[in-house]
Image (spheres, helix red, strand yellow):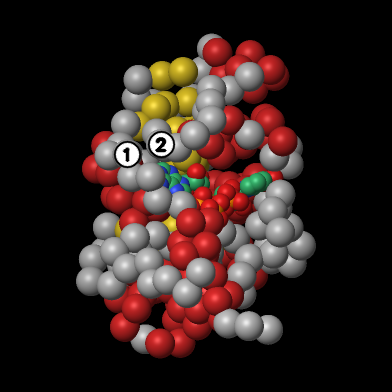
């Protein structure tokens, strides 16, 4: 059964690091991959762009291909966008047997033990860890290290429960650096798809960071 994989994120804004990672995961797992924007991301300050603006950027970024799709189910829920709720909802849609894979960058994986009901994530899905360049150690420590020790697998088998590493082309691109570039009056072209620059309105919330208030 072909796996379903999701890459959740704030996508503030979406960039080539997300897109290439999702694309390579789709190829490596032979999976359908959906990008799932968080309406209210837990564990971080409110995004610069509202959910509708971030989704509009994602739609522009994903145009012209159909291997990566958009899943907006988190926009329909109030309160923090907990991933465990998203996985439960996806599992209800796809039934008990189809492999479901939660894709996370290695930085996000290292912090997994702070997520809401984090151990339950593994009852709904496998976790696919995407290599991510950049400073700092991305090695899990403490309870997460113990929990995942017996779950590492070479490939996805069965519906849920394993941790698989997915080696991807390292692209040291982060939304933080893109926002900083706009705030400094820059134009961070080619870090995110050209389509995102084609409609002035799409990047307006980020350009506003560079305007005097
Ligand atoms: N360049 C990248 N390579 C691999 N994974 C990435 C990359 N950028 C983001 N991710 C992963 O995509 C998911 C969503 O990331 P997010 O939307 O927070 O982007 P970000 O660039 O990390 O944003 P910010 O800089 O605002 O924290 C996370 O699991 C993150 O680890
Ligand atoms: O469920 C949680 O408690 C939780 C805590 C932190 C992050 N997440 C999810 O992880 C994804 C990446 O988060 P972020 O903040 O790095 O964009 C996004 O889908 C978030 O909703 C989820």
Residue 45 showing in the rendered view = yes
Q: Is residue 164 above or below residue 74?
A: above
Could you tell me how far apart the alpha carbons at marks 2 and 1 are, in whole angstroms? 6 Å
Residue at the image position 39 percent from the left and 27 percent from the top: 165
Q: Residue furthest right?
A: 79
What element does badge 1 sit on? loop
Q: Is residue 53 left or right of residue 189?
A: right
- Label 2 neighbour load within 10 Å: few <14, some 14-19, many 20+: some
Q: Which percent across, then down, holds residue 148?
A: 57, 19
Residue 94 showing in the rendered view = no
Q: Which percent across, then down, holds residue 201?
A: 46, 87
Work out which quarter of the rendered image holds the C terminus and state it.
Answer: bottom right
What element does badge 2 sit on? loop
- Which image quarter: residue 133? top left
* Mark closest to the chain's N terminus, 2 or 1: 2
Pick the front one: 150 or 183: 183
Q: Which percent across, then down, holds residue 212?
A: 63, 83
Residue at the image position 69 percent from the left and 64 percent from the top: 46
- Residue bearing the label numbered 2: 133
- Residue bearing the label numbered 1: 170
């Amino acid at each position: 059964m072909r796996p379903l994989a999701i890459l959740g994120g704030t996508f503030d804004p979406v960039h080539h690091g997300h897109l290439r990672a999702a694309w390579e995961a789709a190829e490596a797992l032979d999976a359908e991959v959906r990008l799932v924007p968080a309406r209210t991301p837990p564990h971080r300050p409110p995004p610069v762009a509202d959910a509708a603006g971030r989704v509009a950027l994602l739609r522009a970024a994903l145009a012209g291909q159909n291997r990566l799709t958009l899943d907006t189910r988190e926009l329909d829920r109030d309160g923090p966008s907990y991933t465990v709720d998203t996985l439960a909802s996806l599992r209800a849609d796809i039934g008990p047997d189809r492999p479901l894979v939660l894709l996370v960058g290695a930085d996000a994986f290292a912090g997994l033990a702070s997520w809401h009901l984090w151990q339950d994530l593994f009852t709904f899905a496998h976790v696919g860890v995407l290599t991510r360049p950049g400073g700092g150690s991305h090695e899990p420590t403490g309870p997460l290290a113990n929990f995942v020790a017996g779950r590492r697998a070479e490939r996805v088998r069965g519906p849920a429960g394993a941790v698989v590493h997915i080696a991807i082309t390292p692209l040291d691109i982060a939304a933080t650096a893109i926002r900083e570039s706009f705030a400094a009056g820059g134009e961070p072209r080619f870090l995110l798809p050209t389509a995102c620059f084609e409609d002035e309105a799409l990047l307006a919330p980020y350009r506003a960071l560079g305007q005097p208030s």
